[in-house]
Image (spheres, helix red, strand yellow):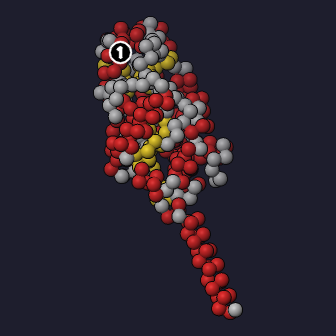
Amino acid sequence: MRRSLHVIALLVIVVALAAGCGSRGAAQVTLKVGSKDFTEEFILGEMYALLLEDAGFKVERRFNLGGTPVAHAALVKGDIDLYPEYTSTGLLTVLKKAPIADAKAVLEEVRKSYKDQFNLEWLEPASFNNTQALATTKDVSDKYGVKTYTDVAGKAGELRLGGPAEFAEREDGIKGLQKAYGGFQFKEFKQLGTGSLRYEALKNGQVDVVVAFGTDGQISGLGLVLLKDDKSFYPVYQAAPVVRADAMEKNPKIAEALNKLAPVLTDEIMAGLNWQVDGPDKKEFAAVARAFLQEKGLIKR
């Protein structure tokens, strides 16, 4: 009888230890979350990090890596385990494929090709569409009569464009626009990155048109004119976590933690979050990300 009690007690201890190890399993894993070099990427990267921490993982933040080529290379190499990427950026810039108009078809293509070529997984994309765009001030729009991309194509020789260096070479940048619209030979192209410098240069009259994104807070915040893509050159750009498949296989809870974010990020909400950081309040992106997730009940702390 005494021996039986000892055996039962031992089994209880083993079960308890196993349960304890299971609850600590995620915490024993460190995930490296990266981001590209602009506000929306910082906010999304921080949201991913916070959701993963809430799920029990340890997280190392490696934000502000640079443009798409740098971030993608870091992911493939294993310097990071995941980062936010945009579906049509993956399609056009990374895979070098032709644009696809249908959002679901874009996602299907990048999921298949990224898995086949890089062993990377795309999780669920957010609801918002941060399509590339061109923006200007009302004064410039009125002065040069530019309201559409066709207008810009004809007037480009009189206009100075500001944007990230890669825009000059990307197929979804100047090269692609030239093929679709003709023209687009600007008087000057100033390399201004993807951050708020573009809008400061536009506001200060250093450039006439800037490369913008559909969810940039400055568009409504500064009362800018979003030029109309009248030939629908740009496809849909939905943001999603792109994750190393080996990390996913070892830690399936990654998908569970991150996929719950996708439905709550609409165009209006993402633009508002960006404006909290880039607007006059100049809030820290980490504080904005945390407050939003807490408000939506997606993290506990």
Residue found farthest to the bottom: 2
Residue type beneath disc 1: Ala
Query: Where residue 234 sits in the image (x, y, percent)?
Result: 43, 22
In this figure, which residue is indicated by the disc labeled 1? 180
Secondary structure type for disc 1? helix
One can see residue 271 in this view: no
Q: Does residue 245 lie above or below 11 as drawn?
A: above
Residue found farthest to the right: 1
Residue at 62 percent of width and 42 percent of height: 292
Query: Where residue 179 sits in the image (x, y, percent)?
Result: 32, 16
Residue at 61 percent of width and 74 percent of height: 15
One can see residue 297 in this view: yes
Q: Residues within 10 Å of mark 1 (few under 14, many from 20)?
A: some
Q: Nearer the viewer, residue 283 or 108?
A: 108
Query: Where residue 71 sits in the image (x, y, percent)?
Result: 37, 43
Query: Where residue 118 sits in the image (x, y, percent)?
Result: 35, 44
Q: Does residue 236 lie above or below 138 as drawn?
A: below
Q: Does residue 179 lie above or below 269 as drawn?
A: above
In the drawing, does residue 69 fall left or right of residue 239?
left
Quadrant location of the N terminus? Answer: bottom right
Residue at 40 percent of width and 39 percent of height: 112
**Which quadrant of the view contains residue 93?**
top left
In the drawing, does residue 245 fall left or right of residue 190?
right
Residue at 58 percent of width and 42 percent of height: 261
Q: Nearer the viewer, residue 212 or 169?
A: 169
